Image (cartoon, rainbow, N blue to C red):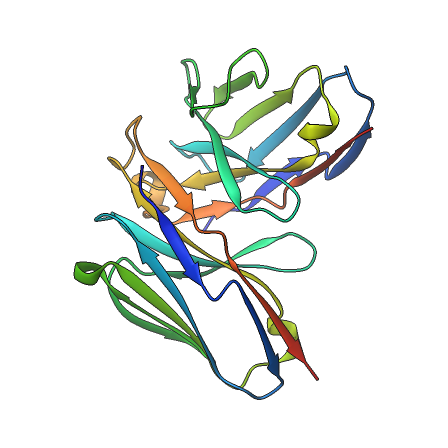
Amino acid sequence: SAVISQKPSRDICQRGTSLTIQCQVDSQVTMMFWYRQQPGQSLTLIATANQGSEATYESGFVIDKFPISRPNLTFSTLTVSNMSPEDSSIYLCSVGGDSSFDLGYEQYFGPGTRLTVT
Amino acid sequence: GIQVEQSPPDLILQEGANSTLRCNFSDSVNNLQWFHQNPWGQLINLFYIPSGTKQNGRLSATTVATERYSLLYISSSQTTDSGVYFCAVASGNSGGSNYKLTFGKGTLLTVNP
């Protein structure tokens, strides 16, 4: 398995500001993903963070709103830009889904970042 | 895209009771996982089970890929089993740009003492 940490664990932000969330993995991984979980809802994939290239975004999510960096095989950041109260959610980092680096095909999730926008 | 349906949406049990949660999916999948989200929001991996049956203590799971469903069994439930149980299925090419894990809406389980 993989040990995943996220910073910050929670934050309260004012509308119009931006927050950058960090995800650190204890081993090298090929696939890293960012998910959003709105209050009382299920998890939705925002994007796949690709090392050395631009992230691949799901329908309904755009790079200007959710810029992602992936500088190496153990680290990624997600920025939530120009926030509004509708961005209040838990944001989760995830790794796995392929057989590289001995993780197998199972996906693992970080503890999440609980964001409240006022 | 692939559809994932979980039932029941809510379930209330007395401690010690058994339960079965169901996950139906609309297309063939590369893998299937069950997660438990505890009250603090942490997602805990329960099973990676693209097919067959697995058991881990009081929990077991069965996936019948040809019929596109999976079942999660919880026996002798405890209050610590409370939380949301998610089924998630993977589609696309593993390691490829179209790979994606799609979640169902979850089953909210409450176990009362």
Image point (32%, 48%), residue name: A104
Question: Relative to residue A53, is residue B53 drawn left or right?
Answer: left
Q: Residue farthest to the left? A: B66
Quarter holding residue B12 = bottom right
From the viewer's side, name the closer residue of B92 and B9: B9
Quarter holding residue B79 = bottom right
Image point (40%, 13%), residue name: A53
Placement of the C terminus of chain A among the 4 image quadrants: top right
Spot occupied by residue B48 in the image (x, y as percentages of width and height): 36, 58
Image point (58%, 34%), residue name: A24
Q: Residue farthest to the top? A: A64
Q: Is residue A62 above or below residue B30?
A: above
Q: In this view, does B101 lie above or below A21?
A: below
Query: How many discs mark residues in the rendered view?
Result: 0
Spot occupied by residue A10 in the image (x, y as percentages of width and height): 76, 38
Spot occupied by residue B46 in the image (x, y as percentages of width and height): 46, 63
Question: Relative to residue B100, is residue B19 drawn left or right?
Answer: right
Image point (66%, 44%), residue name: A39
Question: Relative to residue A58, is residue A12 drawn left or right?
Answer: right
From the viewer's side, name the closer residue of B106 and A66: B106
Q: Is residue A106 above or below residue A28?
A: below
